[in-house]
Amino acid sequence: MTAAPSGESLAPVLAAAPAADGEFVEITDTDVDQVVELWRECGLTRPWNDPHLDIADARAGSTSTVLVARADGRVAASAMAGLDGHRGWLYYVAVAPGLQGTGLGRAAVVAAEAWLVARGARKIQLMVRTTNDAVIGFYERLGYADQETTVLGRWVEPS
């Protein structure tokens, strides 16, 4: 088992609370609009990111996916996962507001971690807006910690 510089294990917790109607599965075409609606309900979308395009991009290659769980036949939770070579990244972890606090968010993270580990991820990271204190606490309870890095970014024009 690989260990981080501080000695803690990098392996994610792989025993999750069960999803609402069973397992997390990869998104289907019929799930897309429900997932976008869920992301909007959870405040995860931004005007400068087209969520439909983000989903299409994640589904286009073998190093990323969107996982969903259903409750009563509707998408109740999601997690987007992507592998950059050795790091796994989590995006758009969302749980329907009425189901938050039930363990479904933890199950979404664990399902995405398992997907990434199965594809060779040695470390899993995510970004949370600094103003989202409740979500930062959620991830800290799952073992995520501030990596003492600054994320820089720049928009580029498509050619």
Image (tube, rainbow, N blue to C red):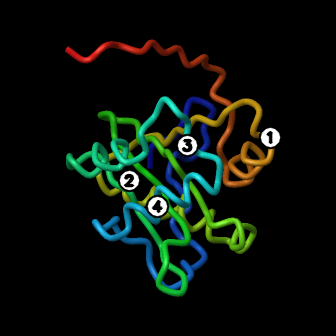
Give the residue type at disc 2: Val
Residue bearing mark 1: 133
Mark identifier at residue 35 = 4
Q: Nearer the viewer, residue 91 or 47?
A: 47
Give the residue type at disc 4: Val
Nearer to us: label 1 or label 4: 4
Whole-Å distance between the Cαs marked 2 and 1?
27 Å
Mark 2 Cα shell of 10 Å, populated few (<14), some (14-19), many (≥20): many
Q: Nearer the viewer, residue 89 or 78?
A: 78
**Residue 52: x percent and y percent?**
37, 48
For label 1, the SS is helix
Whole-Å distance between the Cαs marked 1 and 4?
23 Å
Residue bearing mark 3: 45
Mark 3 Cα shell of 10 Å, populated few (<14), some (14-19), many (≥20): some
Image marks 3 and 1: residues in contact by CB distance under 8 Å: no
For label 3, the SS is loop
For label 4, the SS is helix
Q: Nearer the viewer, residue 115 or 97?
A: 97
Whole-Å distance between the Cαs marked 3 and 1?
17 Å
Mark identifier at residue 38 = none
